[in-house]
């Protein structure tokens, strides 16, 4: 059932976005795994376009916030506004109160704003001056990030990166796909052609289905072994946290469900290790100087070749 | 002509041939197995012996993708069905009873690679 929904969603997003099937699938997996995604790539590479099309295909409420250096936390989470007629303060919800929030260029905002958003992502609730409001469910943040070499960006600290379940890197498309992109953009893009293909209650059911995907104790042991192998690798200053491993497990469950299985296999873990773990690992200065390009991905790939999966 | 020498030589050649055949047959012989899990156990041993360069972190699917490139005489559709049943048994909570002849055939083919 989940796999058919996946192809329906892909059919819809394809109407406006050319050639981003793998990225769409990853975002869907992350959504079903109750996580948040960091979309990384240079400006103008269809990150925002895909996020909007994805939200429309799910028929969920969608909001977009463009992060800027002069933002305040209340611009995201909301705050108390004085109501003159009632002579009292009322809580006005910020844009974080939505099902799908596109936090555009999240690393352009000052750390206080990033921190307010990331706390909301973690707790799925907002507390302002002792007043707590729950966020809608399901809720996913699609944060877009410019590469850190760009001007005017504040790099996300490790603790905040750890709250993003996946980092999906958008690369330039191959020549033929880019030609199709240009063809598609000869006219205006009409998001009206993207139809919602799944309802809210159905989505909640799917999320529950993913949670029920079977994981054997041996598979948990394999995941733990991978985590420990990375933490003890001398090339890494910072290995994966237990939270990272939990999120990798959830993503493996979502992948298994999308492939029509009721249980996870080692391939699910291996296939999602890089997108879930790479942005959380930090190379030692020495390893970075030795040019381990593209960084932690290489270490992850080596560990996956060394640690024996249950066969 | 020394017939004794010829006969001894012929005998020796015959026994050598017989010994070679016995050793060869023993090499190709696979352990008796009674179920799918044991069949995959045999395949695992043969893969470890036959392709020692394969990194230990490979999953079954990766191993199969690797041996498929070696042009072995195996019915991959039938093997795929056995593999699905094995995965369901190994990582899920059912299955385990499926035809495993093709798994053993692959084990024999991998054994020939040595």
Image (cartoon, helix red, strand yellow):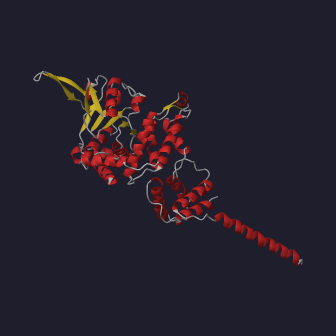
As drawn, is A201 to the left or to the right of A165? left
Regarding residue A148, the answer to whether it shows in the image is no
Residue shown at 44%/35% (left/top)?
A: A279
Residue B22: percent from left, percent from top = 70, 68
As drawn, is A230 to the left or to the right of A41? right
As drawn, is B16 to the left or to the right of A250? right
Residue shown at 88%/76% (left/top)?
A: B4
Residue at the extreme left: A85
- Relative to A19, residue A156 above or below: above
Residue A298: percent from left, percent from top = 51, 39
- Relative to B15, residue A226 above or below: above
Quarter placement of the N terminus of chain B: bottom right
> Residue A250 is drawn in which quadrant?
top left
Regarding residue A143, the answer to whether it shows in the image is yes
> Residue A17 is drawn in which quadrant?
top left
Residue A308: percent from left, percent from top = 55, 47
- Relative to B61, residue A244 above or below: above
Quarter placement of the C terminus of chain B: bottom right
Residue A266: percent from left, percent from top = 48, 49
């Amino acid at each position: 059932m989940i796999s058919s929904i996946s192809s329906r969603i892909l059919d819809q997003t394809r109407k406006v976005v050319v050639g981003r099937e793998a990225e769409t699938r990853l975002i869907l997996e992350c959504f079903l795994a109750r996580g948040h995604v960091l979309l990384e790539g240079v400006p103008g590479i269809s990150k925002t376009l895909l996020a909007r099309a994805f939200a429309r295909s799910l028929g969920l409420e969608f909001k977009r916030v463009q992060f800027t250096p002069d933002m305040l936390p209340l611009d995201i989470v909301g705050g108390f506004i004085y109501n003159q007629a009632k002579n009292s303060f009322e809580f006005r919800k910020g844009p974080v109160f939505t099902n799908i929030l596109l936090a555009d260029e999240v690393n352009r905002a000052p750390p206080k704003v990033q921190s307010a958003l990331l706390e909301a992502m973690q707790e799925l609730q907002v507390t302002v001056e002792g007043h707590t409001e729950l966020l809608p469910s399901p809720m996913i943040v699609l944060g877009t990030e410019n590469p850190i070499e760009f001007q005017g960006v504040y790099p996300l600290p490790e603790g905040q990166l750890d709250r993003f379940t996946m980092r999906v890197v958008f690369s330039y498309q191959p020549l033929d796909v880019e030609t199709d992109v240009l063809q598609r953009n000869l006219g205006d893009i009409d998001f009206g052609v993207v139809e919602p293909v799944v309802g809210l209650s159905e989505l909640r059911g799917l999320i529950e289905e993913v949670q029920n995907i079977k994981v054997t104790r041996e598979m948990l042991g394999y995941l733990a072994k991978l985590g420990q192998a990375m933490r003890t690798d001398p090339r890494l200053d910072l290995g994966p946290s237990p939270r990272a491993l939990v999120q990798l497990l959830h993503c493996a469950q979502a992948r298994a469900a999308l492939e029509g299985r009721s249980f996870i296999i080692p391939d699910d873990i291996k296939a999602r290790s890089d997108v879930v773990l790479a942005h959380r690992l930090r190379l030692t200065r020495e390893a970075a100087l030795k040019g381990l390009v593209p960084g932690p991905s290489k270490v992850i790939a080596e560990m996956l070749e060394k640690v024996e999966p249950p066969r | 002509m020394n017939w004794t020498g010829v006969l001894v030589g012929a005998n020796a050649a015959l026994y050598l041939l017989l010994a070679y055949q016995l050793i060869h047959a023993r090499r190709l012989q696979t352990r008796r197995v009674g179920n799918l899990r044991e069949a995959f156990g045999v395949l695992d041993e043969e893969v470890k012996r036959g392709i020692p360069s394969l990194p230990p972190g490979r999953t079954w699917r990766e191993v199969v993708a690797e041996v498929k490139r070696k042009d072995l005489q195996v019915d991959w559709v039938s093997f795929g069905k056995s593999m699905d049943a094995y995965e369901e048994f190994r990582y899920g909570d059912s299955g385990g009873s499926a035809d495993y002849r093709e798994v053993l055939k692959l084990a024999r083919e991998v054994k020939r690679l040595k």
